Image: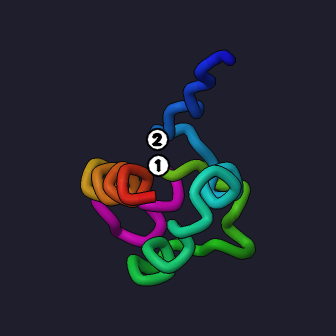
């Protein structure tokens, strides 16, 4: 049995890809004002810029969600 590591989530990950990998992140993104519908094709970096959200902090919160799952 092989261990498959999930692809890392980073600034270039799109919102849609993030939600596919970590569905629980939907509420987090909505709480931060990131568009999860029409902005789904944006990268996390672009989406954070649009919403005025600090990218590194968001990535830390997403990482915590992944570890809690």
| Residue 18, horizontal then vertical, whole percent | 60, 53
Q: Are marks 1 and 2 in contact (CB under 8 Å)?
A: yes
For the stretch drawn in magenta, the main secondary structure is helix
Whether residue 57 is situated above or below residue 52 in the rendered picture:
above
Task: Check disc 1 and report the residue beneath it.
Answer: 45
* Mark 1 vs mark 2, CA separation in Å: 5 Å
Whether residue 57 is situated above or below residue 9 in the rendered picture:
below
Q: Is residue 53 magenta?
A: yes
Secondary structure state at the residue bearing disc 1: helix
| Residue 25, horizontal then vertical, whole percent | 51, 67
**Residue furthest out toward the top:** 2
Binning the other alpha carbons within 10 Å of mark 1 as few (below 14), some (14 to 19) or many (20 upward) gives many
Give the residue displayed 35% in from the left and 69% down from the top.
52
**Residue furthest out toward the front:** 1
Secondary structure state at the residue bearing disc 2: loop
Q: Residue 37 is drawn in which quadrant?
A: bottom right
Q: Residue 31 is drawn in which quadrant?
A: bottom left
Task: Check disc 2 and report the residue beneath it.
Answer: 11
Q: Is residue 24 left or right of residue 21?
A: left
Q: Residue 51 is drawn in which quadrant?
A: bottom left
| Residue 36, horizontal then vertical, whole percent | 64, 72
Binning the other alpha carbons within 10 Å of mark 2 as few (below 14), some (14 to 19) or many (20 upward) gives some
> Which of the two residues, 9 or 45, is positioned nearer the viewer here?
9
Whether residue 59 is situated above or below residue 65 in the rendered picture:
above
Residue bounds of the magenta highlight: 46-55
């Amino acid at each position: 049995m092989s261990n498959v590591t999930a692809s890392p989530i980073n600034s270039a990950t799109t919102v849609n890809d993030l939600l596919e990998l970590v569905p629980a992140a939907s509420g987090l993104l909505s709480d931060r004002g990131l568009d999860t519908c029409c902005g789904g094709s944006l990268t996390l970096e672009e989406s954070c810029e649009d919403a005025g959200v600090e990218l590194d902090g968001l990535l830390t919160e997403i990482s915590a969600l992944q570890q809690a799952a």
